[in-house]
Image (cartoon, rainbow, N blue to C red):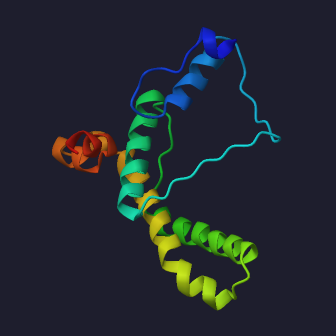
Amino acid sequence: SVWEQIPFPDIAFAEDQAWADQVMQAGYKTAYAAESVVSHSHSYGPWVNFCRHFEHAVAMRQLFSHYSNRRFKECIPEAAAVGKRDLVFWRRQTSRSKVQVVSRWALPAVSWHVAANLGTWLGERADRLPPRVARLFSLQEQVKRR
């Protein structure tokens, strides 16, 4: 009934975050439902992942001025740490050896997370970029050009 009363906003990005904000401002609460099942996947390469995170950070800054303020020097170490967690997960999910998992997935995992972190870092500062550069990094603009 809340979703019918307050439909998702018609915006290009972060509509779920904007909706949750509207719902909470209307006096409702959102909650984590551990028993829920969601199938969700992104099979992006590093460039599209960079652009997606850039776009997400731009949208979140527009919606919530207090949204994050990642420091550049944190981008690479954080990407390495999350990439390492991915490798541990993949090792547990497959019957491959540690050497097989690392040799196949270390570079893709770390590059994917570096792209995400740098995209977020730049997206948080998109208002300081020349408009042409911001459009180059915008996933929405890339879709429009196709």
Residue drawn at x 48%, y 78% is 107
Q: Residue furthest top?
A: 5
> Measured from the top left, where is residue 19 in percent x and y?
56, 23
Q: Is residue 16 above or below residue 106?
A: above
Residue drawn at x 66%, y 70% is 85
Q: Is residue 102 above or below residue 118?
A: below
Residue 58 falls in image quadrant: top left
Residue 16 falls in image quadrant: top right
Front-most of residues 110 and 104: 104
> Measured from the top left, where is residue 128 in percent x and y?
26, 43
Front-most of residues 61 and 84: 84
Residue 25 falls in image quadrant: top right
Residue drawn at x 41%, y 26% is 11
In which quadrant will I find the C terminus?
Answer: top left
Front-most of residues 112 and 72: 112
> Measured from the top left, where is residue 133 in percent x and y?
20, 49
Residue drawn at x 39%, y 31% is 12
Query: In the visual, does 39 lie left or right of 63?
Result: right
Q: How many marks?
A: 0
Query: In the visual, does 70 lie left or right of 146?
Result: right
> Measured from the top left, where is residue 143 in percent x and y?
29, 43
